[in-house]
């Protein structure tokens, strides 16, 4: 799947502040949803995390605000359907 994240901590105004990269699709746990994200926003928390937290072991995915379509549900999920 495609993701948006960053490799190095620093200001959001940097030319390479956000990058697109490929990552594996996670399988939902018992109480989780798998959502195909159709829209995102960058909020102040994303900017602060990007500025201060150096990712370990590869790019870090940002994002606290997203909208999309439920693609899969965990075994304990009853209020959402794919």
Image (tube, rainbow, N blue to C red):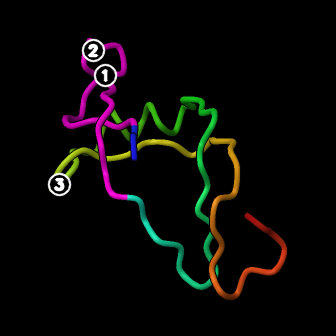
> The magenta stretch spans which residues?
4-24
- Quick check: marks 2 and 1 in contact, CB under 8 Å? yes
| Location of residue 15 (image quadrant) | top left
Is 9 colored magenta in this rendering? Answer: yes
Q: Which residue is mark 1?
A: 11
Relative image position of residue 43 (x, y in whole percent) = 57, 31
Name the N-terminal-most of marks 2 and 3: 2
Q: Which residue is mark 2?
A: 14
Is 79 colored magenta in this rendering? Answer: no
Q: CA distance from mark 2 to mark 3?
A: 20 Å
Callout 2 crowding tier (Cα within 10 Å): few <14, some 14–19, many ≥20: few
Q: Which residue is mark 3?
A: 56
Work out whether 32 lies above or below 39.
below
Judge from the rendering whether residue 56 lies leftward or rightward of residue 62; answer left or right.
left
Residue drawn where x is 84% and y is 73% of the image: 79
Relative image position of residue 33 (x, y in whole percent) = 63, 67
Relative image position of residue 12 (x, y in whole percent) = 36, 21
């Amino acid at each position: 799947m495609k993701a948006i994240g960053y490799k190095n901590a620093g200001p959001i105004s940097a030319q390479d502040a956000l990058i697109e990269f490929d990552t594996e699709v996670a399988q939902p746990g018992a109480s989780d949803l798998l959502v195909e994200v159709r829209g995102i926003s960058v909020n102040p928390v994303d900017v602060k995390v990007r500025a201060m937290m150096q990712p370990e072991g590869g790019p870090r995915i940002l994002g606290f605000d997203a909208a999309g379509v439920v693609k899969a549900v965990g075994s304990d999920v009853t209020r959402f359907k794919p």
